[in-house]
Amino acid sequence: MPDPQEALQSGLKAIACLEDEIRDFINTGRNQVRLLPERSTWNQICSSLDVIGDTTLSIADYISVSFPTTPGLQYIYTYGLLQALFLQQDAIRHLAEAFELDHTPSQRLLKIRELRNSAIGHPTKQNIGKHRYYNYISRISMSKAGFTLMRSSGDDGETHFLNVDLV
């Protein structure tokens, strides 16, 4: 089985290569002539590519540096990583939209969005369907590799613990 760190770095390199290929494509004379008059589409493409590149850099740095020892910075790193993944997904969806391509995120990507929303997007009061949840990141469980998310339901009083694997 491949090393998860190596797989992540390989995936990030692939994203960076695809970003470069798309930039080369849109900056080719005949493509630029076709795209530039549609300013809204052009700006959506350029903005999406910038966000994809920026988030790829932030994820690569998250992987390469030591995890902080203080809780405040641990939260910032964790929040930042989850937000970068969320932004990157939005940028890819908007890039596909600008090129009029179908884009259906995988179940794994949808799970990442759901975990981001639960952990940092709407933790204090999250409505999903007819249920309301209150979410807590267990501070003591935080590490570079992940954390435990405690999820309580206001409806039935049940509490669930989800182990979130960030790698």
Image (cartoon, grey):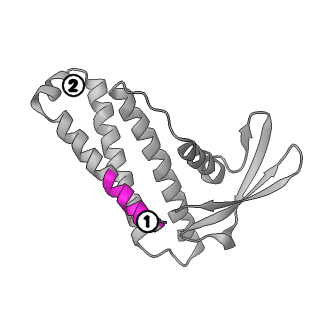
Q: In the image, what residue type sits under mark 1?
A: Tyr
The x, y position of residue 120, in whole percent, is 61, 53
What separation in Å lies between label 2 and label 1 (alpha carbons)? Answer: 35 Å
Does residue 138 belong to the magenta stretch?
Answer: no
Query: Residue at the spot x=52%, y=62% of the render?
Result: 167
**68, above or below 161, in the image:** below
Callout 1 crowding tier (Cα within 10 Å): few <14, some 14–19, many ≥20? some
Horizontal arrangement in the rendering, residue 149 relative to residue 5 (left or right): right
Residue furthest to the right: 156
Q: Main secondary structure of the magenta part?
A: helix
Query: Residue at the spot x=32%, y=38% of the render?
Result: 47
Horizontal arrangement in the rendering, residue 90 relative to residue 51 (left or right): right
Query: Residue at the spot x=68%, y=73% of the render?
Result: 140
Q: Front-most of 96 and 40?
A: 96
Q: Earlier in the sequence, mark 2 or mark 1?
A: 2
Residue furthest to the front: 1
Q: In the image, what residue type sits under mark 2?
A: Leu
Horizontal arrangement in the rendering, residue 1 relative to residue 49 (left or right): right
Query: Residue at the spot x=77%, y=46% of the render?
Result: 133
Callout 2 crowding tier (Cα within 10 Å): few <14, some 14–19, many ≥20? some
Q: Number of callouts in the render?
A: 2
**97, above or below 15, in the image:** above
The residue tagged with tag 1: helix, strand or loop? helix
Residue topped by disc 1: 62
- Magenta stretch? 4-14
Residue topped by disc 2: 35
Residue furthest to the left: 29
